[in-house]
Image (cartoon, helix red, strand yellow):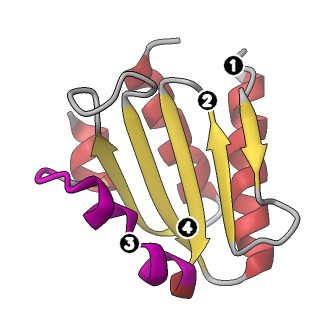
Amino acid sequence: MQAEQLKLLVIDALEDIKAENIEVLDVTNMTDFTDFMIIATGKSTRQVKALANEVVMKAKAAGVQPLGVEGEEVGEWALVDLGDVITHVMTAQTRMTYNLEKLWSVPDVQSTESASRE
């Protein structure tokens, strides 16, 4: 599956479980280990776990085996590594604390509306 298709699959999975503030960071020119980072917020630790699980289930259904899943037990921050797309799902407080968007300093962060239409 191409990185663009995988990105859209992850966005759909997150939207299905009502993730908030989904942002897509295109990091193809910044790193060689992934093309996209998708960051989303869950309203609770339970929702963070459900969102990460939904990403894993949809990826597997599409024939993509996750390379790793971290943080599901605690639920403050879950990471799903699908190779070309790495998904970070966090509670609002955790997302504010780590501010990955700023850390990666990507000038062209896309909202899911613009990312899904490209």
Q: Earlier in the sequence, mark 2 or mark 3?
A: 2
The residue closer to the viewer here, 48 or 104, is 104
Instruction: Give the vertical position of 31 relative to 70 (above or below).
Output: above
Instruction: Give the vertical position of 3 relative to 42 (above or below).
Output: above
Give the CA separation, mark 2 to mark 3: 21 Å
Residue under label 2, please give it.
82
Magenta span of residues:
94-108
* Three-letter code, disc 3: Asn
Q: Label the magenta part by its dominant secondary structure.
A: helix
Residue under label 4, please give it.
19
- List x then y, in percent, for residue 18: 58, 68
- List x then y, in percent, for residue 49: 78, 64
Kindly identify which numbered label has been placed on residue 99. Answer: 3
Q: Do callouts 4 and 3 mark residues in contact (Cβ within 8 Å)?
A: no
Q: Point out the frontmost of discs 2 and 1.
A: 2
Give the CA separation, mark 4 to mark 3: 17 Å
Residue under label 1, please give it.
64
Q: Point out the frontmost of discs 4 and 2.
A: 2
